[in-house]
């Protein structure tokens, strides 16, 4: 998958700005890091808001709301492998440094955990985990994939990268050509293709139960205990580094605002403007991986 088409253009960073940024970040004693969708564009996952290349700029797609998910089995079917990139690996390595405090991510792609990060809060949940809305039991997404395969042995997809010859086709297959991967893990699948697709129920609760990817949908709320925990980390931190987030939604911006009230350094690396630019001590407009390799 070509990833460069999801990364917005950026001008070279002025040396003075880069010098100030590096001087501050390398001297923070307890660094809190917060990441957004912009860091995963280098993994081939588009963000929503980047000018010209984000999903809002290129399509009419809008995220599925929690109300739509709960009300429609069709939407639950539709909601259901991107690699870690240099930024994910770098942040995982930082955990070995005693100056690294914690990592908060707004992303649901699970790539931080896949890269080995453990001092991590996934603010909006993780698409690699599925939970039952009745008993709250959690299951690994790969386990659920096995259930999908068992219930739909003749169902497959074509993602445009695989060339299947006519003589290789199984006449019993249901083939759906999928669309583009989105920041929330959603893709376009034609309605007709999933009419007969069977979705599994919770093994404990049985028929009538709903298994939902363990993410905070648009219209849903981040659990209070998670918010409070993140506020505690802001209070412990002596510096905040924001990577790849426009900070448009309050769920992330509130921690930047809290850091500003504490008057600790706020460093932002993001291509394009962010809601927190006026609060930033230093703002760098560049690819996150290019800046992190300098630290």
Image (tube, rainbow, N blue to C red):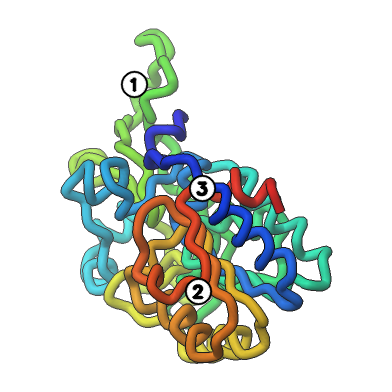
Residue 252 placed where, x, y %? 43, 75
Q: Residue at x 36, y 64 (%)?
A: 274
Helix, strand or loop at mark 2? loop
Asked if residue 210 can be seen in this view, the reply is: no
Front residue of this view, candidates 211 and 25 = 25
Asked if residue 124 can be seen in this view, the reply is: yes
Front residue of this view, candidates 43 and 21 = 21
Residue on which disc 3 sits = 14
Residue 183 placed where, x, y %? 39, 53
Res 253 quadrant in image: bottom left
**Earlier sequence position, callout 2 versus callout 3:** 3
Q: Local crowd at mark 1 within 10 Å, few (<14), some, or many (≥20)? A: few
> 72 above or below 87?
below
Q: Residue at x 60, y 69 (%)?
A: 33
- Does the residue at mark 2 contact the one at mark 1 (Cβ under 8 Å)? no
2 vs 1, front mark: 2
> 43 above or below 38?
above
1 vs 3, front mark: 3
Cα separation, mark 1 vs mark 3, equals: 60 Å
Cα separation, mark 2 vs mark 1, equals: 44 Å
Res 279 quadrant in image: bottom left
Front residue of this view, candidates 106 and 113 = 106
> 208 above or below 168?
below
Q: Residue at x 52, y 60 (%)?
A: 243
Disc on res. 272: none
2 vs 3, front mark: 3
Q: Local crowd at mark 3 within 10 Å, few (<14), some, or many (≥20)? A: few
Residue on which disc 1 sits = 171
Q: Local crowd at mark 2 within 10 Å, few (<14), some, or many (≥20)? A: many
- Does the residue at mark 2 contact the one at mark 3 (Cβ under 8 Å)? no
Cα separation, mark 2 vs mark 3, equals: 33 Å
């Amino acid at each position: 998958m070509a990833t460069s088409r999801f990364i917005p253009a950026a001008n070279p960073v002025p040396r003075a700005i880069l010098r100030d940024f590096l001087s501050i970040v390398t001297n923070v004693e307890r660094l809190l890091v917060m990441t957004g969708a912009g860091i995963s564009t280098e993994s081939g996952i588009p963000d929503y808001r980047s000018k010209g290349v984000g999903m809002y700029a290129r399509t009419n797609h809008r995220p599925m709301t929690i109300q739509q998910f709960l009300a429609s089995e069709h939407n639950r079917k539709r909601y259901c492998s991107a690699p870690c990139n240099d930024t994910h690996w770098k942040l995982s390595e930082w955990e070995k440094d005693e100056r690294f405090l914690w990592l908060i991510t707004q992303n649901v792609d699970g790539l931080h955990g896949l890269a080995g990060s453990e001092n991590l809060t996934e603010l909006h949940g993780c698409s690699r985990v599925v939970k039952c809305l009745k008993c709250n039991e959690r299951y690994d997404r790969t386990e659920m994939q096995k259930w999908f395969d068992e219930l739909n042995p003749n169902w497959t997809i074509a993602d445009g990268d695989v060339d299947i010859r006519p003589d290789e086709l199984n006449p019993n297959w249901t083939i759906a050509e999928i669309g583009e991967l989105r920041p929330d893990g959603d893709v376009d699948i034609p309605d007709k293709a999933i009419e007969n697709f069977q979705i599994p129920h919770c093994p404990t609760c049985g028929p009538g139960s709903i298994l939902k990817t363990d993410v905070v949908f648009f219209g849903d709320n981040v659990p209070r205990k998670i918010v409070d925990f993140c506020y505690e980390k802001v209070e412990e931190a002596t510096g905040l580094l924001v990577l790849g987030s426009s900070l448009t939604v309050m769920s992330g911006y509130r921690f930047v605002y809290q850091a500003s009230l504490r008057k600790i350094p706020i460093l932002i690396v993001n291509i394009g403007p962010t809601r927190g630019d006026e609060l930033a001590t230093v703002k760098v407009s560049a690819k996150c991986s290019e800046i992190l390799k300098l630290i």
